[in-house]
Amino acid sequence: MKKIANLEQIPANGCFVAELDGKKIALHNVDGKIYASDTQCTHMGGPLCKGKILQGKYVQCPWHGATFDLETGEVMSGPTKKPIKVYKVKVEKNEVLIEE
Ligand code: FES
């Protein structure tokens, strides 16, 4: 696993775009649980970090409403069938690590 951010960089119930090896990854803080996903929606590239969190683990794209499961990347609804990539996250002390 690789360190991608410090915990305090991710706002409470917010999102932070971090970079690892030149790739942007969205870190979502949902009631203290951290999820890591692609930053761009698979429909037309909408910014998932600006999306709404639904039912504690789904992110809704702000552009046309595609909704993805942050645990699996699966599409729950919306105008795309293509899942997003999600990453396994581990928090150690104040460091956020992800598995690529
Ligand atoms: S770009 Fe995300 S739903 Fe269209």
Image (spheres, rainbow, N blue to C red):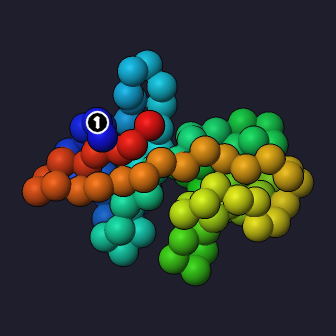
Residue 19 location (% of width, % of height): 39, 29
Q: Secondary structure at mark 1?
A: strand
Quick one: 65 or 88, which is closer to the camera? 88
Q: Is residue 46 visible?
A: no
Q: Is residue 57 above or below residue 2?
A: below
**Is 52 situated left or right of 26 in this image?**
right
Q: Which quadrant of the view contains residue 6?
A: top left
Residue 39 location (% of width, % of height): 56, 40
**Is 76 situated left or right of 40 in this image?**
right
Which amino acid type is marked by label 1? Lys
Residue 20 location (% of width, % of height): 38, 28
Quick one: 76 or 53, which is closer to the camera? 76
Q: Is residue 57 visible?
A: yes
Residue displayed at 76% across by 67% down? 76
Residue displayed at 29% across by 55% down? 90
The quarter of the rendered structure image containing the N terminus is top left
Residue 41 location (% of width, % of height): 70, 44
Furthest-bottom residue in this view: 55
**Is 89 situated left or right of 54 in this image?**
left
Q: Which residue is mark 1?
A: 2
Q: Is residue 24 above or below residue 65?
A: above
Furthest-top residue in this view: 22
Quick one: 97 or 13, which is closer to the camera? 97
Residue displayed at 28% across by 45% down? 97
